[in-house]
Amino acid sequence: MLEADRISYAYAGAPAVREASFRAGERGELIAVIGPNGSGKSTLLKMLARVVSPSSGEVRFEGKPLQEWHAREYARRVGYLPQDPDPVFPMRAIDVVVSGRAPFLARFQWERDSDYDEAERALAMCDGSHLADRYLDEMSGGERKRVFLARVLAASPSLILLDEPLAALDIAHIQQFALLLRDVATSTGATVIFAAHDVNWAAAYSDRMLVMDHGALALDAPPSLVMRADAMQRFFGLDAAVIEAGGRTWIVPRTES
Amino acid sequence: MTSAAVGRRRPRRRESIVLPITILLVVLAAVSLLAICFGTASISLRSLFGGDAIARAIVFRLRVPRVCLAAAVGATLGVAGVTFQTLLRNPLADPFILGVSGGAACGAAVATALGLSAIPGVVPAVAFAGACGATAAVFLLARRRDHTDPVRLLLSGLVLNALFSSIILIAFSLSRQSDLTAALRWMMGTLFGATWNDVALVGTLLVVSVAVLFWIANDLRMLAFGEEDARSRGVDVERIKLVGFLTASIATGAAVAVSGIIGFIGLIVPNLVRLAWRRDFRALLPLSALAGATLVVASDLVSRVIVRSSELPISAFTAVLGVPFFLSLLRKAR
């Protein structure tokens, strides 16, 4: 479904992503993009979301290069959640969610009842029905995340791109939100690609991991091959111990002494 | 209703804008009627339709065009304000901060200093050119490679405003005393001497700009979520920004050219409307137009009648009337 073919991007001469290639698109697959800060995770997602165009290389979706997709057609199939979405003016949650239906509206058309139906369905999927009438600026960080995930889901995309969806959440909410992502992938059959900076959470809730290292896609492997002391040393420069607990593998930094 | 739905209130869906629009239309009509009847000379409806020629002349030659111009200018400034605020994702953006009005004022001041104010139509034309020039300059300064940065846009506007102020000061120092009075009047904003030609100019550009903005409204409102988000929703962000910015600027240029600088409307009206009815750009556009028209007509009325046989500057009253409204809404909002 999605193929990235040696894509690169540079900000004002400084390369952010260098010749990354991979394929994705299995039904319900959860793919985590990890790597140190500044390794190019966000830029990679932006290229896939058609927010920026690669300076070289090509992304193809359903066999067609991204630049040949009509912007609205692509937006109906691919959902993208930026790292820190913030509508500056006060908005109700249901209006935020229904705005995810924008690619389906004609020029002068306002949201129809069917669009609100989709929005309510999406909000319910994210356990956010009770938030519908509330304003975003009155919500906690976790509630806002739910609303924005619902906004992405309101378009029923087959590919979902999320930039750091677990950032700025406390540990209980990370767990809740990651489980929600798993549910969404399973129940909608969408492929979910999300960037994360915490390897432990990323590994616990993904089927596959893409490790970015200085803009290059250094490793494309299942979590079991990433969650190793040698990989942590190589990609994060971290001296780490690997422990098994609760049926999962966890990376624990060795404390200096 | 199924049993599962019992007890859970359904969220309100799309809220109609018929009621807010009706309210504003009624208030605008009422204020306009008052503005036509009251002024330095009060005119009763009976004398107007009873064949009083002087009353008729005052009303149809002076007051009706003046009220129409006030409404058109107010609507234009309200529309420009809500457009700039949405484009820049900033509730403080308005035609003044972006340098559009400053450019117009600068053009007018220079034309006055050069002694061109005696020729009718020259000052407004130069003011209009100044507004367009300022818009182009601000937009070019804010452009980086392939996109326009909202923060740079605001900063460029601020810096150009400072430059315009200096030029205006120099131009005024070099102007003759007789020209200076007219120039000052213009700097303070005035609807004095409104003609049907002025109404036609501002009105036409208002209608065109509202039509263009409605054309792009469904995309423009998506900018509220951020440019990258909007792009991922299929919006051609750069094109929308360019069209929106130019449309609002040209309309502002026309309004400033005929009525001078009427402050505060572009800034406060969209915020006022947003506090009263929290909606997105598609609804705020017509509501800001109506609220802007109402506020300017009311301010003009007050500025004409508050001191007997003298007209005070209208800009003084846009704030005097707007601020109490704004504060009461702000208190209610939280």
Image (cartoon, grey):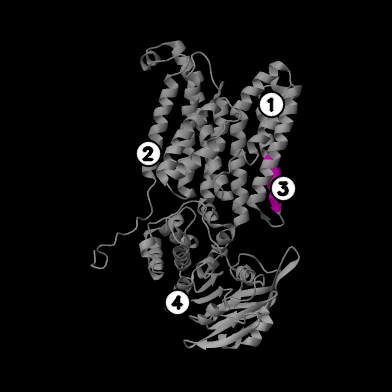
Q: Secondary structure at mark 2?
A: helix
**Image position, residue B44 (x, y; %):** 38, 15
- Subunit that carries the residue with mark 2: B
> Vertical placement of A236 versus A130: above or below?
below
Q: Which residues are magenta?
A: B134-143
Q: Residue at x 60, y 30 (%)?
A: B261
Q: Earlier in the sequence, mark 1 or mark 3?
A: 1
Inspect the image, locate mark 4, and give the three-letter code of the amino acid beneath it: Leu
Do pointers 4 and 2 mark residues of a single chain? no
Residue denoted by label 4:
A179
Placement of the N terminus of chain B among the 4 image quadrants: bottom left
Spatial CA span between label 1 and label 3: 28 Å
Q: Secondary structure at mark 3?
A: helix
Q: Which mark is residue B141?
A: 3
- Subunit that carries the residue with mark 3: B
Q: Residue furthest front?
A: A257
Q: Can see residue B212? A: no
